[in-house]
Image (cartoon, grey):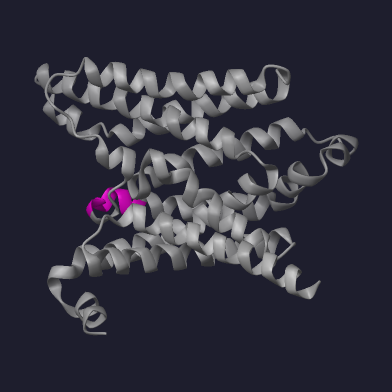
Amino acid sequence: MNHIREIIFLPEYAFLRQAFWVSALASLSFGIIGTFVVVRRIGYLAGAISHCAFGGIGIGIFLQQTLIAAGLTTLASQLNPITTAVVFSVLSAFLIGAVQSYAKEREDAVIGAVWAVGMAVGILFLDNTNGYHNVSAYLFGEILLISNPGVRAVALLGLAVLLIVGVLFKRFEAVCFDEENMTLHGLSPRFYFQILLILVAVTVVLMIQLVGVILVIALLTLPAATAARLTNRLLSMTIVSSLLCFLYSWLGLYLSSLFNLAAAPVIIIIAVLGYTAIVLNEFLFRKYRM
């Protein structure tokens, strides 16, 4: 209880309070987009996009250091690797969307290749960048060190996702459950599926700052997968998923600060435990009911 009061009131815990608010804002995007990822069963596509983002991060760091070497420090300071990661990921979302729509037979192989190439490009650019660069924050996240521009980006993303999904909710629902009916009404399932993939790409990249490339898919899918076992309506799934993501993030941040542990892995472990608890509860309920 004393630790909670310290987090709320002491000035030296300002960074942790900011992390709590950022995780609350991020939960909105994760919960909503994660629901569509789970329902549409495109977790592997989201995984490929997240690993492609590392390619964009590598390119961004390379360009940043090249500009610094050329004496263009002002321009270099304005170039954020997350920006290049967004561009790279959106382009990969277009490619993955095209593969998913037109290359059904070789889909797994092509997606796997895109997944690997994204990481390979990032490694190659980093390997040819002067100096040592610590990329662990991008791989595993560092929510406690997120910058003010990062906070604003997460907030704007949450607002944009809420707005776009609010307007196109019925279309996205049809993409998940009834593409044939969309086609009969003159709507293109591929077009709206592509918009969904772009939202996944932007969400994944901005959330890399919180939990990293390696862990982002877990936090994108686990709360939504848990919510899917608690409700069978899409709208209520998005709400429950967002609330669960919020709960996992706050509890993970609190425990990581209490025991001096890395925040992102603790958040993911709590999400896994939450999902496991629901699955075990269902299993035991069916067993003893029989």
Residue nearest the observer in this picture, 266 or 19: 266
The residue at 35%/52% (across/down) is 265
The residue at 54%/54% (across/down) is 222
- Figure quadrant of the N terminus: bottom left
Magenta stretch containing residue 177, yes or no? no
Highlighted range, magenta: 145-152
The residue at 41%/64% (across/down) is 24
Q: Position of residue 102 (x, y in %)?
A: 72, 19
Residue 236: image quadrant is: bottom right
Q: Position of residue 170 (x, y in %)?
A: 75, 51
Q: Position of residue 219 (x, y in %)?
A: 47, 51
The residue at 55%/50% (across/down) is 221
Residue 88: image quadrant is: top left
Which residue of the protein is positioned furthest toward the right in this rendering?
184
Residue nearest the observer in this picture, 58 or 290: 290
Residue nearest the observer in this picture, 192 or 222: 222
Q: Please identify the dominant SS of the magenta region.
A: helix
279 relative position to 105: left or right: left
Residue nearest the observer in this picture, 203 or 247: 247
Magenta stretch containing residue 150, yes or no? yes
Q: Position of residue 290 (x, y in %)?
A: 81, 71
